[in-house]
Amino acid sequence: MSVILQVSDAHFGTEQAPVVEALVALSRELSPDLLVLSGDITQRARSAQFRKAAAFVERLAVPNLLAIPGNHDIPLFDVATRFLDPYRGYRKAFGEDLEPTFSAPDCFVLGVKTTRRYRHTDGEISEQQRERIARELRKASPSQLRIVVVHQPVAVPRAAEVHNVAHGSDAAVRAWSEAGADVILAGHIHLPFVLALHEVKAPLPRPLWAVNAGTAVSHRIRKDAGNSVNVLRTSRAEPRACIVEHWAFSAPTSAFLRTSETRLG
């Protein structure tokens, strides 16, 4: 069984020290096999913020990392860097690969860079990305849970959030479902949810779930959602099934507490 810790929208530069410490403690308690950073790792893509984020990842002590950039990981005010080398700070902290992959006997995880230098907050999934990920998904073994990681979500549970859905999502969801995807992880809107895409975007060839994470450690929380992370556990008994756990920060206990779990598959 693999344990995957999804941390999104940490926004280093706006982090809260007690929440950071609580998340470090949670990671050491759970001993996850893979850490997924689904974007907006920093608040303004500044070197000091990337250094803080990299030090935080080191403290989590997870043996494997899959990270993708969010729109906040591209400089906003440094216009020259934004257009000439937008991922310079990100690459220095987290490596050259902006669309990494991870493979284990029971899971196959693919990162997709949905940010664009010419878009302020919107995300986009290009035709080339859609087809490349579909090809990769078809290479997975029958025992592997197939996960795609994006920053901007491919679907949302509330009409008021539709403007946050990545451009090209409908075509990507259908193509990835046909190719065998099981779960699409995202963040961006600081709202945790689990959504059955095969119900809201029906008909799809097979079940496909959108799993969104809240903001992990930032003080930039929503009124209806505090700091939280997701934990995915693959199933020993049933290949390509998993449990999604939502862990929320509790100020009274200064700890992350498991508040819900959803079985997928």
Image (cartoon, rainbow, N blue to C red):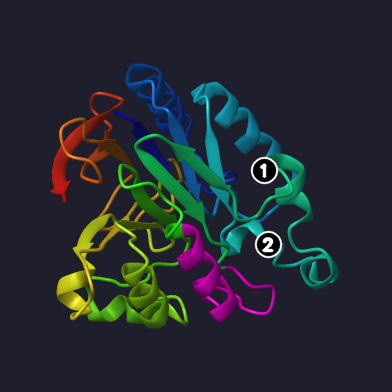
Q: Nearer the viewer, residue 225 or 113?
A: 113
Near mark 2 (Cα within 10 A), the count class, few <14, some 14-19 or many ≥20, is many
Q: Is residue 60 above or below residue 87?
A: above
118 falls in the magenta region: yes
Describe residue 87's horizontal placement relative to residue 72 as left or right: right
Q: Kindly state the secondary structure of the residue where label 2 is placed.
A: loop
Q: Nearer the viewer, residue 24 or 145?
A: 145
Residue at the spot x=32%, y=76% of the render?
Answer: 161
**What residue would you read off at disc 1?**
49
Quote the CA–CA distance across marks 2 and 1: 12 Å
Q: Which one is earlier in the sequence, the residue at label 2 or at label 1?
A: 1
Mark nearer the viewer, 2 or 1: 2
Q: Is residue 134 above or below residue 216?
A: below
Q: Are marks 2 and 1 in contact (CB under 8 Å)?
A: no
- Residue 224, visible in the rendered structure: no
Residue 253 % position (x, y): 24, 23
- Residue 106, visible in the rendered structure: yes
Describe residue 128's horizontal placement relative to residue 105 as left or right: right
Numbered mark located on residue 35 in the image: none
Q: Nearer the viewer, residue 81 or 234?
A: 234
Describe residue 7's horizontal placement relative to residue 93 as left or right: left
Tell me the kind of residue under disc 1: Gln
Q: Kindly state the secondary structure of the residue where label 1 is placed.
A: helix
The magenta stretch spans which residues? Answer: 115-136
Numbered mark located on residue 74 in the image: 2
Describe residue 97's horizontal placement relative to residue 197 as left or right: right
Residue 171 % position (x, y): 40, 82
Residue 247 % position (x, y): 26, 37
